[in-house]
Image: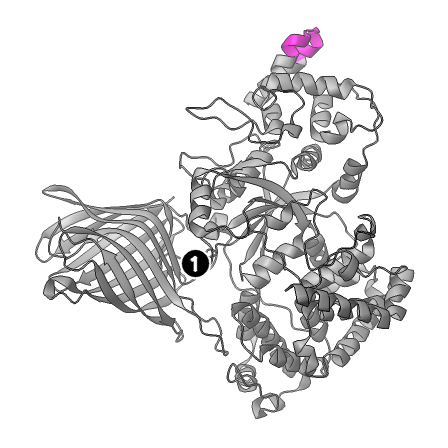
Amino acid sequence: MRRLLVTLSALLFLHAGSAQAADTALSDHSRWSSLLHFDRDGIFSEPRSAVLDDAFFLAEDGQYDPAAELAATLAALREAPEEGEVHARCRFPARALWLSRMTGEQWPDAECPEWESWQQKHAGAEVGLMFASGYLGNPASFFGHLMLHLEREDDEQDATMSRLLDTSLNFGADVPEDEGLATYMAKGLLGGYVARYSRAPFYRNTALYSEREMRDLWHYRLSLPEAERELLVAHLFEVIGQDYDYLFLTENCASRIARTLELVVEEDLTPGNAPWVAPETLVRGLGEAEVEGRPLLKSTEHIPSRRLQTEWRYHDLAAPEQKAARAVWPEINRLDLLAAPFRQLPPKRQATVLDTLLGHAAFLKQTGDEPGLAERERQLLQARLKLPGGTEPLEPGEQVPLHKATPPALVRVEGSYHEALGASSRLTLRPLQYDLLDANSTRMPNAALEIGRIEVDLGDDGPKLNRLELFHVTNLHARSVPLPALPGMAWHASAGIERSRLNCRDCLDGHITLLAGKSHRLGRYLPFAMVGGQFRSERHQAGPVAPMAQVGALSDWSVNQRTLLQFTHSNSLQGEAGRRTQWRLQHRVGVNNALDLRAGVEGDDTAHEVSLGVSWYF
Amino acid sequence: MKLMTITSAVLAGSMMIIGATSASAATNDNINPWQHCGIGAAIFDKNGTAAALSNVIWDSGTTAVTSATISPETCESKEVEVAQFVDQTYDQLAMETAMGEGEHLTAALGLMNCSREAREGVVSQLRADLEQASATANYAEQAHADKAFQYYNSLNQAAASCAAS
């Protein structure tokens, strides 16, 4: 609405011939701010553009003064082109387009080879987003990654071909290759990196995300009116390669893409007051936004990772074919293409089995260096090439797009009964992101990633902190198909404050816990065992370092029901005060996308407690 | 890595000469995209900034030898676009060629301007070439770039009629 009013006032002033007033209206216009990425302001700093490059501004103080930049831009656009110089309309085609639409002015003709080359490739492109699911291999990728996606308009080509040859615009920080983790995290959180949009064919991203990191991609197609698409695609030309501020939490891929899209979407695409902008925030914002009264989000498409494709292929095989697949590749270092269960299949089914195994070999190549794997892949290729071409279409499993998945923040209210301390209520707040019970395949199956979870008991003696988890990351790393795999590691890392015994309310101690081990899927059960240690404070327990072992099982009963059973033993070898055995059983029943019910019972050497609660996700 | 780079480049160069009949017929000049355009390293926008970007971990490559005598325009040709695609997606292309279909294979044929009618014959030829190339155990030890270059030549030869049509 504000944008409409400013537009009307600018047009009114232009019509009335008040140039100064019109310029003021234009420079105050939200689209002008968006074109300049004028969205950086803080308590201690004056408002400015997020773009750091001087070359992005025509006025000397254009980074800080939108009105000066408007005047300089209009002046430059009105100038006749000079030989050897790139005219403003070539450098800033989106500014030229929008200002022409607003003022009715036409700019002098100019030769713009780079802009024309861009137009040749991207004029008329559909604009969308590509979301790469979270990846626990790199802290910066825990919450996923977003890229802009320009889809070619080419009716004659196959859709799949168009997609691979489409263009990705990736906003990422420029990080030196040899940067240490501590520096990387410090600069990422506090500042010190610059970020840029870079352009690459989409197949480079499928190679990285789908094939190498085994991350699912989601294509979010946007429905934008043609004129808006034209403006946005022109603006993308202006911003490629420009240096921007980068902060991992607030000035990241999601926030910059949101600010870029807001050039043509009159809504805050990352609403809320959270001190971070996650890719999920923007994806959910897209799902809610409208342009000219129509939903901004046109459609979503899931692009499964190599791991998931292979899983689907395997589960599509009939039982004798699955048996044949296991017989052909019984162990990681042995291939038996003469195995009877395989030879007994007709050629077409043999081909389907080999297609599955080729996919599995591609997956294995990315999970580690196994000597001889290349040779086994070669043998599979040879065997497959001797059979007729043609493959079974993939039967996709049910996948929920991120914007429809359970939201990451939760509030839980529980009633609990403690055999020693009596009944109390417990309030849990978790800003981010999922635990082992509410994780799903859209984010990361069989994993937990929680940040800033806090549990407070509300009893007769007032509120008492039960637990604060600064972070908690678990990856059970389950194998998805019963084919030979390279050793994978289940692991857990957490840090926070918790009660050192269950029979007291004030015995809080800090800890850092690191565990590693194995998991093995048995149907719907995923048992796991990990060993490691705990570094901890000693206010209510003995020993600053305690070796630790944990065993447990995660059970999937249905899409909405899951159970977690865990036993943990730690022992600092300092007598009873340094020893503790805990166990916990939790069951989750998902009611809908935003609600679940949880029942739990837990105990240690000192007491037991039962609880029942309801969670609201938002 | 450096030694490997040079060795692979020499290998690729030799293979180019051996495969000149097929490659040069389609590419119409003596450009070896691997050798002359640094494929396997990083070729991006003209601003050249993408290589080091976070979340962009491209193949470090084994045959990145950029020649100062080759102009940037040369390396923006269709042939180089095809070569980049083959280099970057070789593993998927080989797998899908063995299967006889797949989105990477479709994209490669699209880049070669092969009509739907022509694709069956081209895929047939690609499968035969790959069967021959992977017939011996040496294939497993071959450098990625060498396999990709071989496939590129095979694609150029098999799809020669597509380009002409």
| Position above or below: A18 against A282 | above
Say which quarter of the image contains residue B66: bottom right
- The residue that label 1 is drawn on is A440
Looking at this view, is A294 or A367 the one in front? Answer: A367
Q: Is residue A20 magenta?
A: yes
The residue segment tinted magenta is A12-22
Say which quarter of the image contains residue B23: bottom right
Where's residue A327, x and y in %?
Answer: 54, 87
Looking at this view, is A277 or A418 the one in front? Answer: A277
Where's residue A547, x and y in %?
Answer: 24, 66
Q: Residue at coordinates 60% horizontally, 36% vertically from top-left?
A: A243
Looking at this view, is B25 or A388 the one in front? Answer: B25
Q: Residue at coordinates 79% horizontally, 18% vertically from top-left?
A: A79
Q: Chain of mark 1?
A: A
Looking at this view, is A135 or A593 the one in front? Answer: A135
Asked if one can make out residue A351 in the rendered structure from this viewpoint, the answer is: no
Q: Residue furthest front?
A: B3
Q: Is residue A8 magenta?
A: no
Where's residue B47, x and y in %?
Answer: 69, 42
- Drawn side of residue A277 relative to residue B60, left or right: left
Q: Residue at coordinates 84% horizontally, 62% vertically from top-left?
A: B115
The quarter of the rendered structure image containing the N terminus of chain A is: top right
Where's residue A427, x and y in %?
Answer: 24, 45
Asked if one can make out residue A165 in the rendered structure from this viewpoint, the answer is: yes
Residue neighbourhood size for the residue with mark 1, other residues' Cα within 10 Å, grouped as few (<14), some (14–19), many (≥20) = many
Give the prevailing secondary structure in the magenta stretch. Answer: helix
Residue type for callout 1: Asn
The quarter of the rendered structure image containing the C terminus of chain A is: top left
